[in-house]
Image: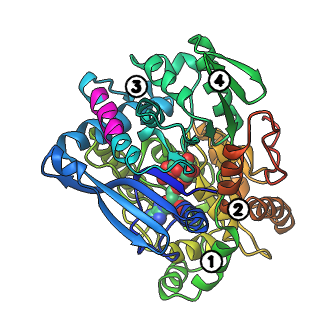
Amino acid sequence: MGRLIVVSNRVPPPEDKRASAGGLAVALQAALRERGGLWLGWSGETAASEADSERVKTRVEGNITFSLVDLTQRDIEEYYSGFANRALWPLLHYRLDLADFDRRDTSGYFRVNALFARILAAEVKPDDEIWVQDYHLIPLAAELRARGITNKIGFFLHIPWPPPDVFSAMPWHRRLLETFTAYDLVGFQIDYDAENFINCMVREGIGRETSRGTFRAGEREFRIAAFPIGIETDEFAKMAVEARETSLVHRMEESLENRKLIIGVDRLDYSKGIDQRMLAYERYLDNNPSSMGKVVYLQITPKSRSEVPEYADMQREIAETAGRINGAFSDLDWTPIRYINRTIRRTTLAGLYRMSDVGLVTPLRDGMNLVAKEYVAAQDPENPGVLVLSRFAGAARELDGAVLVNPYDLESTAGAIAGAISMPLDERISRWRGMFDRLRQYHVNNWCDTFLETLEKPLNVPAFGSQQPPLRKAS
Ligand code: ADQ
């Protein structure tokens, strides 16, 4: 078996060990360690010139080489802030109203993909397998093939894929779709995304499905499948138990004075539906006067992508909504919403999930949503909280013990919050148990292994082992 090469927009710092790193970074590093390999991506730093971008900084940790590329200010603006985050991110989250399709950004996106391909092509050895992560790097395989690379190349999209009528609103939709045919395996979070993608390819006449999950486009044949990403379930559960003893979690508990706690944890992003969630909570307070003073909603939201204008607007809107609700409902000794704009240590986060009676995870659209899974993993088996989950999160296809809501429907989300707050213990336990078992069975390491095994299998061999549990029935 050759080396594994992972390519992603950002590369986690090698010193990022388990306590602070997310499950995905840990799982990919474990896969790299197992086989030896290379992780290539943007360093997060700005290069003074294009020539500086070509000078890759490498760090070697055991059998893993981290290759970090600095990007010029123009590359960052066009490729990252522009095409990736102002065109693809809103488009793939069904937000055409927020998408900005700019010709210059598009050429910046392809230019940076070509830069990564040039750097990588010089490194690739014949047996290496390449795994490209996420929407920043869709054309990378096509750029590598153009440079004569014939190795196996897989791609995994962490975010949703919309139906053809949404996707084709982007002027360069066909050009981008065609680049997918350079991969050997294209992975999505859930089956709905894979179906939407296949429909886009077929609608454009790029090719056809030859058998379930196998797609032919001209001379090329490749696989398309869903690989729902998991978390480091047992490790996270253990962290949640230990975190109960930390001083921050104690302080939080004392400050609650036996009130019920609802928790929301999201990067500040319009896809997460934070504003709608606060409005649904307001509706809940309105509809349930007896809950006044007895419930606290903690929303932890670190700022993200502040350089993108749509994010700055949204940041203001959410802060105003929280302020307005608090102004209207607060009492001398009670504030209904605690809104925090910062990153919290993973251990503390685990402890806060565990002490919360309700996990409120209501994105308008989300590839998977790991917060939903972390909330479940962190619960006390004898007294678990209730997960209220948007039907538009990929996680809703798996977590069948969650109370599913439509986040656009404030009234029914308010009703779901009320139901979750008062849910009897036996129902809470039975809903939680199945979800937890599933999360243990399909750990993030299994996700990694299943993807790589599928990438390695010849096309005439059935794709899946038994690791991947079936998805819930469509609701
Ligand atoms: P994200 O959109 O970033 O990920 P999510 O899956 O919820 O969304 O992951 C966020 C991670 O950040 C979680 O591990 C969470 O614990 C952490 N986090 C959030 N707020 C935090 C805070 N205040 N402090 C510290 N940590 C915080 C994208 C896709 C998702 C997909 C993932 C993985 O948008 O749909 O699930 O990739 O594939």
Helix, strand or loop at mark 1: helix
Identify residue for label 4: 198
Q: Give the foreground label among 3 and 2.
A: 2
Q: Is residue 48 depicted above or below 352 in this figure? A: above
Q: Is residue 250 visible?
A: yes
Residue at position x 28%, y 49% in the image? 306
Helix, strand or loop at mark 2: loop
Image spot of residue 251 (x, y percent): 48, 84
Q: Give the foreground label among 4 and 1.
A: 4
49 part of magenta stretch: no
> Which label's residue is closer to the chain start, 4 or 2?
4
Per the rendering, the mark at residue 240 is: 1
> Which label's residue is closer to the chain start, 3 or 2?
3
Disc 1 under 8 Å from ligand 1? The reply is no
Image spot of residue 130 (x, y percent): 53, 47
The colour scheme applied to this rendered structure is rainbow
Pick out the residue farthest to the left: 48
Image spot of residue 386 (x, y percent): 71, 61
Image spot of residue 439 (x, y percent): 74, 61
Identify residue for label 3: 97
Q: Give the foreground label among 2 and 1.
A: 2
Residue at position x 34%, y 36% in the image? 114
Q: Is residue 80 left or right of residue 8?
A: left
